[in-house]
Image (cartoon, rainbow, N blue to C red):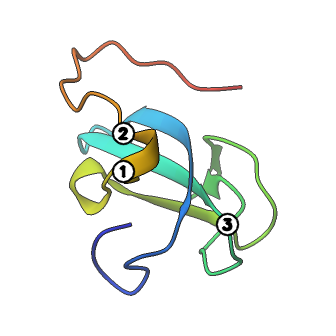
Amino acid sequence: VKSGNLANELGYVRFVGDVAQKGLFVGCELDEAHGKHDGEVKGVRYFKTAENHGYMAPCDKFQSYAENAISLNWDGMVAMIA
């Protein structure tokens, strides 16, 4: 996470996609229990993780970890990771 109250938190991407027609969001499983949920947001299950390890925000709130860097050139084709 690169900004906000959870800046510098590390975790794993568990979901990438459109959320409630608000644009591209990333769902992340945080390494520490500093999140807001378990992957369910407003009654919709996007991914599953331990309680308070889930965080969902617009994609511009995230940055890739240098050692795991991937291309940031998304082509719009995404799917939920099960």
Image point (60%, 74%), residue name: 35
Q: Residue at x 49, y 73 (%)?
A: 9
Q: Amino acid at mark 2?
A: Ala
Q: Is residue 70 left or right of residue 71?
A: right
Say what amino acid the circle numbered 3 marks. Answer: Asp
Q: Earlier in the sequence, mark 3 or mark 1?
A: 3
Reading the image, the residue beneath label 2 is 69
What residue is pinned by disc 1? 66
**In the displayed structure, would residue 4 be above or below residue 29?**
below
Residue 80: image quadrant is top right
Q: Residues within 10 Å of mark 3 (few under 14, many from 20)?
A: few
- Circles 3 and 1: CB atoms closer than 8 Å: no
Indicate the quadrant containing the C terminus: top left, top right, bottom left or bottom right. top right
Q: Where is residue 49 shown, x and y percent of the image?
A: 76, 53
Q: Which residue is mark 3?
A: 31
Mark 1–mark 2 CB contact (< 8 Å): yes
10 Å neighbourhood of mark 1: few (<14), some, or many (≥20)? few
The residue under the point 22% across, 32% down is 72
Give the mark toward the camera: 3 or 2. Answer: 2
User: Mark 2 packing: few (<14 Cα in 10 Å), some, or many (20+)?
Assistant: few
- Taking the view exactly as shown, the residue that stands out farthest to the front is 67
Mark 3 or mark 2: whose residue is earlier in sequence: 3
Element at badge 3? Answer: loop
**Where does the image place residue 53, in percent across and percent down from the top left?**
69, 67
* Residue 79 image label: none
Extreme-bottom residue of the structure: 5
Which residue shows up at 21% across the image and 14% down it? 75
Report helix, strand or loop for mark 1. helix
Is 78 situated above or below 23? Answer: above
Q: Amino acid at mark 1?
A: Ala
In terms of image quadrants, where is residue 73?
A: top left
User: Distance between the Cα atoms at labels 1 and 2?
Assistant: 5 Å
